[in-house]
Amino acid sequence: MSIELSTIFKSAKPIIGMVHLPASPGQPQFKSKPDLKAMISAVSADVKALQDGGVDGLLFCNESDLPYTTRVNSEVGAWTTFMIGAVHDQLKLPYGVNLLWDPIASIEAASASGASFVREVMCGSFASDMGPLAPDPALVAQTRVRLKAEHVALFTNIVPEFASALEGRTVAQRAKAAEYFGFDAILISGPVAGVPFSNEDLLAAKETAKKIPVFANTGVNATTIADTLKIADGVIAGSSMKVDGKTFNPVDPKRVIELVTAANKSR
């Protein structure tokens, strides 16, 4: 049985804001002898801007770990858990974890850090810029049980960024499979972070998966969010709330308020 998202979020159509963490140890962007105080301060500032601006949840992600992989090393999970722990006392909202593109490591980090949900590709087969993307949905579900993390909701991305479906199955077919497998929410993305999703894909998923919510996962901004929420059950937003709308910039408090204000016109 799927987790009702009303047990996690106060809003019926939540806005989840991205907290992009500094690059993890072992990654090309990670600097030797890092200034941990400055890194934690930057993450804390993003959390504060998002919470003060009125979003309904947070999603911690290793977005800076370019190039991405389908199997992250253990230090990535350790780094993510450490960073969440460093700002834990200021967290007022439900939060999730996403370790790109590894659903098992994401669940492990979520379990260790007290997160309420995980975002990842959890079923289907895709040709991606990271190589073949073919998660094991049974192992995903079993990992949640093994870690006694049944309270952690599983958000599966059925139209992932940087990837195309291999098996020739339609978005509607993938949405039906995600629902049948017992995942808790479906995500629809554009081709890369910050780029809008296809309305056709969003509608196809909504019309097929009647029992679980469907979220817009990329490209939502203050201009489009009201119309998006007329169809979608929620959104995950990152780039549009950053300084100058650029993914790897700090969160801009003004942009957060603009997005939330626009969203409130349709929810």
Image (cartoon, helix red, strand yellow):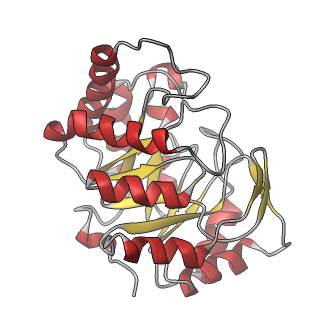
Q: Is residue 52 visible?
A: no
Where, quadrant-wise, is the C terminus in this rendering?
bottom left
Q: Is residue 73 above or below residue 126?
A: above
Residue 33 drawn at (x, y percent) = 42, 11
In this rendering, the count of numbered labels is 0
Q: Is residue 49 above or below residue 2?
A: above
Residue 161 drawn at (x, y percent) = 68, 49
Residue occupying image coordinates x 64% and y 82%: 177
Residue extending farthest left: 89
Residue occupying image coordinates x 41% and y 22%: 250
Where, quadrant-wise, is the N terminus in this rendering?
bottom left
Residue 18 drawn at (x, y percent) = 42, 40
Q: Is residue 3 above or below residue 12?
A: below
Residue 91 drawn at (x, y percent) = 19, 42
Camera-side residue of 150 and 186: 150
Q: Is residue 30 left or right of residue 50?
A: right
Camera-side residue of 242 and 133: 133
Quarter assignment of residue 201: bottom right
Residue occupying image coordinates x 31% and y 73%: 148
Q: Is residue 201 visible?
A: yes
Residue occupying image coordinates x 54% and y 52%: 217
